[in-house]
Image (spheres, rainbow, N blue to C red):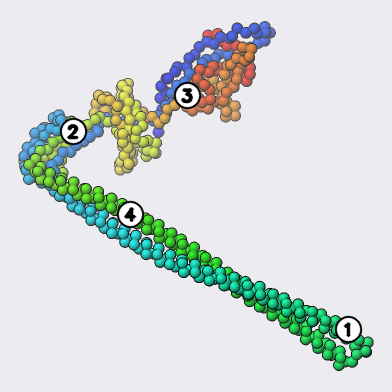
Amino acid sequence: MKKNIICMLLMAATVGAISGCGNDEKKDEQLTTVNAFTVGSRIYENSVSYTGYVSADELKRLSFELGGKIESISVEKGDRVQKGQVVALLDDEKLRTASDNAQENVKLANSSVSLANSNIELAKNKIETAQTAADEIEIGIEADKKTLEKIETGIEAEKLNLSKIKSNYESSLTKIQLNYDNIKKTYDDMQSLFDEGVVSRDDYDKAKLAFDTVEEELANTKKTRDTDIDMEEKKIESLEQDHSLQLSQIKDKENKLSQALQQKQAAEIALEQANTSLSQANTSLTQANIALEDSRNNLKKAQLISSIDGYVAQLPLKAGEVTGAGTPVVVIKGGDEVVYVSVPAEDYADFKVGMNALLVQNGVKFTGSVTSIDLYPDETTRTYNMEITPSEKTGFAMASLVDVYISFDSSEYVSVPISSIASIEGIDYVYMVVQNENGENILKSRQVSIVGEDGENVFVKGIENNAVIAADEVKRLYDNEKVQLAER
């Protein structure tokens, strides 16, 4: 893409001599002399250029609506014709085309009515289906909720039963433990006496048997307690799992219910749209029937009329020949002049309808705009055809070449010479000349951003219009330096 910069001056940079103020400077102070100027703003416009060719924007191939014998052709090749001018006549039977087209429109309108009615029935069926599904799901949800309530009741009952089991065992174990403690003390005393030979083996064995019996009872009771509690806790756990599963099942059905209701709502919207389509189709059918009646009244018309101003470019057929419906009889070149440009594929995405354009031929300039861009490239050149319409009559010769400049964007920026720009580590800046509180001229660096260039000047952001800046030799200057301005 060939990029160009078109710069239209809004405010010329006013270059003026800015003399030093009447300050009382020290005689022994040597001040740097700088050239300075007042900056101005200009329009920076980014554009692309191509070479286009001039043509007419309309090529009209005039044809009868019905095939038949051409009675007469009233124009010759090269003749100027006006819009509405009769250029050829056909015998009356050819006018049946209008009636046939109107009859086809009636058929299409009837088809639209049938289609709308079919869509209405379809939407109604979908509504009924969705409502039935929603009703069934709601019944299932209610049943699941009742089951859930039963499970919750069972959990509460089992928890109460667990509490009773624990309480009962706690009471039994307390009694057994007390008995155990007493018997164990007796056994321990008996064992000491037996060891000392005070009591007989028979008395000792009886004491030991009593102790073994109560010890076994205590152990068995604890084991039974643990087993009963474990079984009850597992029942509760199982019921809680059933509770969780039931909740999940209810949630799933609620989601399905929501989907069914959404489907019903969508079907209701479709029904409303189908009713609207039916109303429109009935209106179209009424209009088509009116058009059919009108076409029958127009069968006497056998004139081929030019729809544009222009000149006769071709006469494919002659009087006396037979033409088919839609076959060109007179080809007219006319309409407004336009300029066509072939856009490469890599540039295609940069353009859009409405962009401004400048047309230049032999130094003569006209403005215009992009009015159309082809959606598909030419199969041979692989370029896209873009049409540019001038804003006024140009007088360019048909098929002549024209330089075309198309604008992308434009903005107003301050324009300064490249020589006034200093750069340090990729940062661009200028030195502004300002006065301190003593009325002395000092330099203040100001960072700028370069947005474009035009020859020896650049467009920048970061300084204001009418600012005074150092013009050249900026590399030898430094911030806050006192300077004197060169005489101009």
| Lower sequence index among marks 4 and 3 | 4
- Callout 3–callout 1 Cβ contact below 8 Å: no
Q: CA distance from mark 3 to mark 2?
A: 47 Å
Asked which quadrant contains residue 435, the reply is top right
Circle 4: residue type: Ala
Residue that label 4 marks: 270
Q: Residue at x 46, y 64 (%)?
A: 253
Q: Quadrant of the N terminus?
A: top left
Q: CA distance from mark 4 to mark 3?
A: 56 Å
User: How many neighbours does mark 3 have within 10 angstroms: few (below 14), some (14-19), or many (20 or more)?
Assistant: many
> Residue 148 at x, y = what percent?
52, 68
Query: Mark 4 or mark 3, which is nearer to you?
Result: 4
| Lower sequence index among marks 2 and 4 | 4
User: How many neighbours does mark 2 have within 10 angstroms: few (below 14), some (14-19), or many (20 or more)?
Assistant: some
Residue that label 2 marks: 308
Q: Secondary structure at mark 3?
A: strand
Up the image or down, 115 lies above or below 77; here it is below
Q: CA distance from mark 4 to mark 1?
A: 97 Å
Asked which quadrant contains residue 76, the reply is top left
